[in-house]
Amino acid sequence: MFTGLIEAVGRAADVQRTAAGLRLRIATALASEMTCGDSLGVNGVCLTVVTSGGGHVECDVGPETMRVTTLGMLQGGEALNLERPMRADGRVGGHFVLGHVDGTGRVVQIREDGDARRLTVAFSADLGPYLVSKGSVAVDGISLTIAALGERTFEVMIVPYTWEHTNLQGRAAGDPVNLECDVIGKYVVRAAGLAAGTDSGRYR
């Protein structure tokens, strides 16, 4: 489990397509603190470290993860948001982020708003029930608060520190991003649907 507070921005040093998906080699200063079998949040996707050393970690990405996240479109050299799992005795500075991406969105607009930036993201209709105004959402693994919610878009405010210490500064209109809805909201919607007999079965 993660909190959506990005620890470091790494780089996709190498992306190798394989018969089983792809092998991702990440350049990061966190490599010296990680061992094989550790979990690592990469742009909001929970991956397992398979090798670590020399300033790099490697992770395997399976076909399903490639299908439902942006990692299947990843190119060498891209900036990656990285976060190690939270400690059981640590503070939850953001919100509970599982690293299980619900789908991809698309950056519609980034505009300045004082010292901050307002990011507009388009999402698919099936994610709508799990997004609420002033609720939490993870965008490429970053814990953010929904400032405004439309039928198929939401807006989040990016404070200067987050802009400078994540990969958002390299994003532009049209770029895809990973989205993970608040897990508490997903359980509430699921329970309400079962009670009313209208459950969509999305998470079956």
Image (cartoon, rainbow, N blue to C red):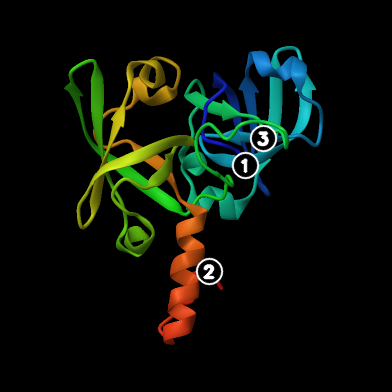
Q: Mark 1 highlights which residue?
A: 46
Residue at 62% x, 17% y: name it.
Answer: 27
Residue type marked 2: Tyr
Which circle marks residue 85 in the picture? 3
Question: How dense is the environment of label 2, judged by Cα within 10 Å: few (below 14), some, or many (20 and up)?
Answer: few
**Badge 2 or badge 1: first in the primary sequence:** 1
Residue 144 vs 63, above or below: the answer is: above
Location of the N terminus by quadrant is top right
x and y, in percent, of residue 149 in the image: 23, 50
Q: Of 157 and 140, which appears nearest the observer? A: 157
Which circle marks residue 14 in the picture? none
**Badge 2 or badge 3: first in the primary sequence:** 3
Most distant residue in the right direction: 36
The image quarter containing residue 164 is: top left
Is 155 left or right of 185, judged from the image as shown? Answer: left
Q: Mark 2 highlights which residue?
A: 203
Q: Which of marks 1 and 3 is in front?
A: 3
Location of the C terminus by quadrant is bottom right
Residue 62 vs 37, above or below: the answer is: below
x and y, in percent, of residue 18 in the image: 66, 42
